[in-house]
Image (cartoon, helix red, strand yellow):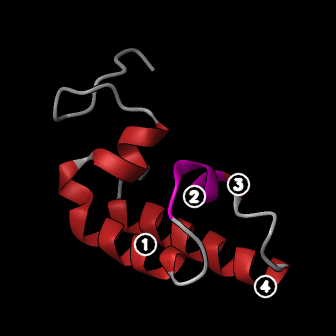
Amino acid sequence: IEDPLCSCGEIEDANHFFLLYPNYLDIRLNLFGLISAYTPVSLETILYGDKTLSIEVNRLIFDAVFEYIEQSNRFI
């Protein structure tokens, strides 16, 4: 991209997108609620899942992350 800055003025990286961007607070809380039912929330878990969990639970985490991305409307 030409400009790595988010509309809020911070560098837009994965950490910012998933954990910090203030406009996504509501959808982030939903994501965290779903993930924290199975494992602690971390950027690593959001991006890669948790190798200590079953494939079924990792699939639920993946689906929650995908839903977050869709609800953000960031990539449309």
Horizontal and vertical percent position of residue 69: 46, 61
- The residue at 55%/67% (across/down) is 66
* Left or right for 26, reference 53: left
Q: Secondary structure at mark 1?
A: helix
Q: Nearer the viewer, residue 47 or 54?
A: 54
- The residue at 37%/50% (across/down) is 19
Crowding around mark 2 (Cα neighbors within 10 Å: few <14, some 14 to 19, many 20+) is many
- The residue at 19%/51% (across/down) is 22
Question: Gap between marks 3 and 4, in whole Å?
Answer: 14 Å
Horizontal and vertical percent position of residue 16: 36, 40
Question: Gap between marks 1 and 2, in whole Å?
Answer: 9 Å
Residue extent of the magenta highlight: 41-47
Q: Secondary structure at mark 2?
A: helix
> In the rendering, which numbered label is found on residue 48?
3
Q: Quadrant of the N terminus?
A: top left
Q: Secondary structure at mark 4?
A: helix
- The residue at 26%/47% (across/down) is 21
Question: Gap between marks 2 and 4, in whole Å?
Answer: 15 Å
The amino acid beneath tag 3 is Tyr
- Is 43 one of the magenta-colored residues? yes
Q: Are marks 1 and 2 in contact (CB under 8 Å)?
A: yes
Question: Gap between marks 2 and 3, in whole Å?
Answer: 6 Å
> In the rendering, which numbered label is found on residue 31?
1
